[in-house]
């Protein structure tokens, strides 16, 4: 049995198709990431998985429980951390968690023990009795995660877990999540707009765009689809289309596409087979074909490259 399983899961808001027939199976104990640009449908998917939002069509199960027919069982199986803050800043961290534990009707002894354990798990024991208004952004997110862990859920759902925190704090949070996943044998399903977060944290990821899943796999599998190396180049006189067609005929070329960067400049993105092709080889090849390269660089594929490539294919 999968921790999470969806079949043609769909959600419409009027004429807007927010989630379009997604099919996913998440293994027990896996860290799975749903990645994509803002508006891709990630938060809507998490709201449906948490049973807070009914699908328009299709089905989903959490730990074998149907999200529509077995809402109570689904909610007892999950912890949920929203993107927006949901703690009282005038209470201490311990008081916030104790209040949440009372909402679950946990006995006093068990409540005290669980609050202490989850505070320790996210590294907040030292600040447990400090009012939340004095917490940093990273401490706030850790407290939110601790709140989601209070019931020892089998599945922890996180919506943009590190949004709004600095780079160093993000890395700390990633390590805490890995620790939680390992020590509590907890399945973690997260949505994120940060591709480096998905790369570092997730066993597998699904790339989502305009409600649809474009690709699913491990970070390495998705990057390998682009080849061992990526070369980005421009040619003088803007003859990108002409040079791209010539490149596509070469046996050492895997994929070629033209994309526009954030400044509005157009580039050729070239995926090569093997690692023996170097920048001087490309420059020499271009010159032999009558083209002059004005800018060129080489790098290993990243998940950002995977996302841009997937988006470019459908536009």
Image (cartoon, rainbow, N blue to C red):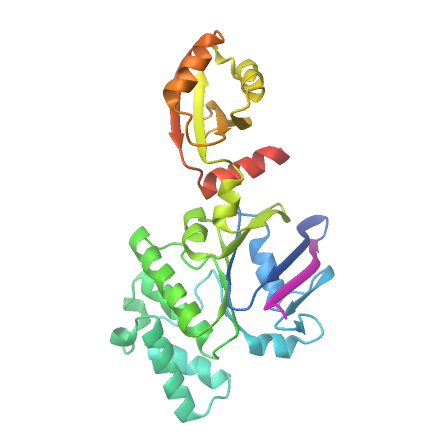
Position in image of residue 295 (x %, y %)? 39, 19
Q: Does residue 72 appear anywhere in the picture?
A: yes
Position in image of residue 310 (x %, y %)? 57, 38
Position in image of residue 153 (x %, y %)? 51, 76
Picture residue at 37% right of the left edge, 70% below the top: 143
Q: Nearer the viewer, residue 100 or 131?
A: 100
Q: Nearer the viewer, residue 218 or 137?
A: 218
Quadrant where the image shows the N terminus: bottom right
Position in image of residue 138 (x %, y %)? 33, 61
- Residue at the right extreme of this rendering: 57
Q: From what the image shows, is residue 1 above or below residue 171? A: below
In the image, the segment drawn in magenta is 1-12
Quadrant where the image shows the C terminus: top right
In the rendered image, which quarter is residue 101 located in?
bottom left
Please identify the dominant SS of the magenta region. strand
Q: Does residue 130 appear anywhere in the picture?
A: no
Q: From what the image shows, is residue 147 above or below residue 197? A: below
Q: Nearer the viewer, residue 251 or 173?
A: 251
Picture residue at 43% right of the left edge, 10% below the top: 292
- Residue at the top extreme of this rendering: 290
Q: Is residue 132 magenta?
A: no
Q: Is residue 8 magenta?
A: yes
Q: From what the image shows, is residue 228 above or below residue 27? A: above
Q: From what the image shows, is residue 96 above or below residue 313? A: below
- Residue at the left extreme of this rendering: 126
Picture residue at 31% right of the left edge, 68% below the top: 133
Instruction: Tell me if 302 is positioned left or right of 74 in this view.
Output: left
Q: Nearer the viewer, residue 248 or 31?
A: 248
């Amino acid at each position: 049995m999968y921790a999470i399983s969806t079949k043609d899961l769909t959600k419409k808001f009027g004429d807007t198709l927010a989630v379009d027939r997604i099919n996913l199976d998440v293994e027990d104990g896996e860290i799975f990431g749903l990645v994509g640009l803002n508006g891709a449908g990630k938060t809507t998917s998490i709201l449906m998985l948490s049973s807070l939002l009914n699908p328009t069509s299709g089905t989903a199960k959490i730990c074998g429980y149907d999200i529509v027919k077995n809402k109570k069982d689904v909610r007892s199986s999950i912890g949920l951390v929203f993107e927006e803050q949901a703690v009282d800043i005038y209470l201490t961290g311990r008081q916030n968690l104790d209040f949440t534990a009372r909402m679950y009707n946990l006995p006093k002894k068990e409540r005290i023990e669980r609050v202490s354990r989850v505070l320790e798990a996210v590294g907040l024991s030292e600040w447990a009795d400090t009012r939340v208004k004095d917490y940093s952004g990273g401490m706030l997110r850790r407290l939110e995660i601790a709140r989601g862990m209070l019931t020892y859920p089998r599945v922890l759902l996180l919506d943009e877990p590190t949004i709004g925190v600095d780079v160093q704090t993000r890395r700390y949070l990633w390590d805490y999540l890995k620790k939680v996943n390992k020590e509590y044998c907890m399945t973690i399903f997260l949505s994120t707009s940060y591709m480096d977060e998905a790369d570092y944290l997730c066993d597998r990821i699904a790339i989502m765009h305009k409600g649809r899943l474009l690709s699913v796999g491990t970070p390495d599998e998705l990057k390998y689809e682009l080849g061992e190396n990526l070369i980005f180049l421009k040619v003088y006189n803007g003859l990108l289309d002409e040079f791209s067609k010539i490149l596509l005929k070469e046996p050492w070329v895997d994929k070629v596409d033209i994309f526009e960067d954030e400044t509005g400049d157009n580039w050729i993105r070239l995926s090569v087979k093997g690692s023996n092709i170097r920048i001087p080889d490309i420059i020499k090849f271009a010159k032999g074909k009558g083209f002059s390269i004005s800018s060129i660089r080489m790098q290993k594929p990243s998940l950002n490259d995977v996302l841009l490539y997937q988006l470019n294919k459908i536009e």
